[in-house]
Amino acid sequence: MKTYWDSSALVAATLDGRTRQLLASGGGITCSHALSEVFSTLTGSRLGFRVDADEVVALLREMLETLKLMDLRPDEIMEALAEARSRGVRGGQVHDYLHAVAARKAGCGVVLTLNKADFAGLFDDLRVEAP
């Protein structure tokens, strides 16, 4: 089964050896926007520390050796946004929703995230799990 990694799971892979091994085992999918979210999280101070930008870029390049990217076309984004209200999506949850839409486009059955509640109930055919 294909597995989609949201940005929080990718951040976890930079900090936790077991999660890093899971990611390195291959078959993971994410979207290009997740790369900027990981960069933002690790170079900012939200985690209580900052990682040097050059180190983050090196980490992301390493991740891309095993990750595949699945991005949404503009028309797919607009279609998803038009359906957002009917799925109860509003505000900041739109970012997680678009991750879920990309996961479905890629044929993933699982979304890995540290923020399971953010994905709960978006799509019945996507399992949401912690990495």
Image (cartoon, rainbow, N blue to C red):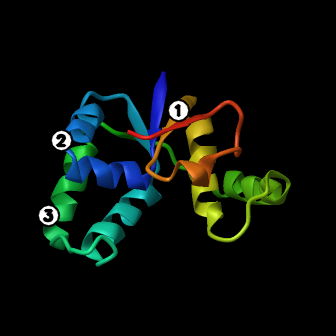
Residue lying at 22% horizontally and 47% vertically, measured from the top left: 16
Q: Is tag 1's residue or tag 3's residue first in the polypeptide sequence? A: 3
Residue 30 in view: yes
Q: What residue type is labelled 1?
A: Val
Give the residue number, with chain letter if any, for mark 3: 55
- Callout in the foreground (1, 2): 2
- Quadrant containing the C terminus in the rendered view: top left
Task: Label 2: state its secondary structure.
Answer: helix
Image point (50%, 53%), residue name: 115
Tag 2: residue type?
Gly
Of mark 2 and mark 3, the one earlier in the sequence is: 2
Q: Name the residue under label 2.
A: 17
- Which class describes the residues within 10 Å of circle 1: few (<14), some (14-19), or many (20+)? many
Residue at 21%, 53% in the rendered image: 15
Residue that numbered label 1 is attached to: 110
Does 108 sit left or right of 62 as displayed?
Answer: right
Image coords of residue 93 (percent x, y): 63, 62
Q: Nearer the viewer, residue 21 or 73?
A: 21
Asked if the residue at tag 2 contacts the one at tag 1, i.e. Cβ–Cβ closer than 8 Å, the answer is no
Secondary element under disc 1, as helix, strand or loop, is: strand
Does residue 93 lie above or below 19 as drawn? Answer: below
- Which is more N-terminal, label 2 or label 1? 2
Percent of width and height locating residue 114: 44, 50
The CA span between labels 2 and 3 is 17 Å
